[in-house]
Image: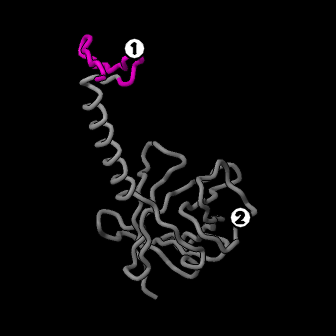
Amino acid sequence: MAHAQKEYNGVMTRTSPHGTLFFQHNKYSVQMKKILLTFYVIMACANIALGQVTISTSDLIGTKWQLLEDYECHSSEYYEFTRDALIWHCSDGDTISYPYYLTNTKPASFVMKKVGVIAKGAYFAKQIDNYIYNCYAIIRFDKDAGKMVHRRVYPTNVIGLTDTFTYILMKK
């Protein structure tokens, strides 16, 4: 015995001989599935394109990086990584030392006991003072090519500050 198929207001139903509903199909559900599939594919590609990389503290120790602005380095300022500090060498000769660490997750606060620990991570946390810290997602790191890119993930939308930074490795 065949199953009965009927359409009610654009909805297809299929019932057994006993009247049990087997299948309900809306002509728009196929289109919605296609739209959702396309959305998921686009999101997956975007995550790959904007994905983070994991680096080790040992990749940073002893390196000096200069901020690249508008594809040129305009100042003599640079950052130098040690095991437990990121040292900013100012153009006037002063230096400012910031504790930092790498982590696999975006921290909710700065954790001082992680400073100086050799670790791997996709996030870089830098303490500015006792209650202020910045966190960056490491987008690209290529020591051989001498390029590092990271994006600020905390705090965000700070007026006057950019959120993505590109650095070039200084030659020794």
Residue shown at 59%/60% (left/top)?
Answer: 104
Residue at the limit of the structure toward the top, as seen here: 9
Q: Which residue is mark 2?
A: 114
Determine contact: label 1, label 2, CB under 8 Å. Answer: no
| Residue in front for this viewpoint, 135 or 172 | 135
Left/right of residue 112 with respect to residue 1 in the rendered view: right
The amino acid marked with disc number 2 is: Lys
**Measured along the vertical axis of the image, is residue 48 above or below residue 160?**
below
Is 150 part of what is drawn in magenta?
no
Q: Read off the magenta span.
A: 1-23
Q: Which residue is mark 1?
A: 19
Instruction: Give residue 64's position: percent from left, percent from top.
Output: 50, 78
Q: Secondary structure at mark 2?
A: helix
Left/right of residue 40 with respect to residue 172 in the rendered view: left
Q: Quadrant of the N terminus?
A: top left
| Residue in front for this viewpoint, 149 or 81 | 149
Disc sitting over residue 170 in the figure:
none
Q: Residues within 10 Å of mark 2 (few under 14, many from 20)?
A: some
Residue shown at 39%/54% (left/top)?
Answer: 47
Left/right of residue 62 with respect to residue 150 in the rendered view: right
Residue shown at 50%/58% (left/top)?
Answer: 137
Instruction: Give residue 62's position: percent from left, percent from top.
Output: 57, 82
